[in-house]
Image (spheres, grey):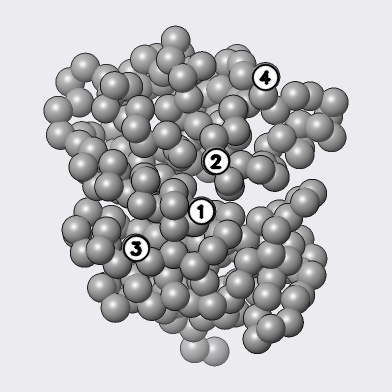
Amino acid sequence: MKNIWNPWHGCKKKSEGCENCYMYYLDRQRDRDGGDIYKVKGDFDLPMKRDRDGFYKIRSGSRIVVCATSDFFLEEADEWRGEAWEMMRQRNDVEFVLFTKRPERIRRCLPDGWRTGWENITISVTCENQRRTDERMPILIDAPVVHKEVMCTPLLSEIQMGKYLDSGEIEHVSSGGENYEGARPTRYEWHLSLYRQCSERGIPFEFFDTGAKFIKDGRMYSIPYSLRREQALKSGLVYPPIMKSKK
């Protein structure tokens, strides 16, 4: 079972990290416009779909990424969001991770009965540089959400977020480079800095993707797509560290 649910597709570019959006690139390969936002009819009700034996296709205990090809709090999706919330409310046995670059819209888009948040909902806000970190993290920290994460992808500069991590509100931080056409380089030391800021505070961190252009020790590397995650993991910038199994 795939771990992504895209109830709607398409987005409007919001900030620097959107410049070379992978979704726009992939849509162009299909002669589509990434700015065309539409409800994905075949997958819209995915959390409620059952297999031929009557079991939910999304199994209990799953962790599902929502809106990998859009933004959950996109204004153009306001008319569909209520239905999506209702499905997530019914499937409280599944963890839904909502991605957004629009944390300023979180409060106005919350469903009835939300109160201080639902245990099965995690909101992950993108922070690609210092400007967006300072703009978005205070809003996320203040939001009535039980589980909060930060994704620094594509990481375009060094980020200092210690004062936000000290709030105790952030449960996980991840980082990665940029892929596909026009990919801008990311630097090893930027990811190392985030790793140190998180590990010093006991906050889980993962550098999960080098991106197409990766600079380390002053040298630029062009990393094949198939090796980008593997190379990122080899850096060891994961906290807590991954324990290697004994042979």
Q: CA distance from mark 2 to mark 4?
A: 18 Å
Residue that badge 1 annotates: 128
Residue that badge 3 annotates: 161
The local secondary structure at tag 4 comes to loop
Q: Quadrant of the C terminus?
A: bottom right
The local secondary structure at tag 3 comes to loop
Between 193 and 169, the one lying in front of the other is 193
Counting other residues with Cα less than 10 Å from the Cα at mark 3, is it few (<14), some (14-19), or many (20 or more)? some
In percent of width and height, residue 95 lies at 36, 41
Q: CA distance from mark 2 to mark 3?
A: 19 Å
Q: What residue is shown at x 73% (from left), y 66% (from top)?
A: 213
| Kind of residue sitting beneath label 2 | Ser
Going from N to C along the chain, the mark reached first, 2 or 3, is 2
| Kind of residue sitting beneath label 4 | Asp
Between 205 and 213, the one lying in front of the other is 213
Residue that badge 2 annotates: 15
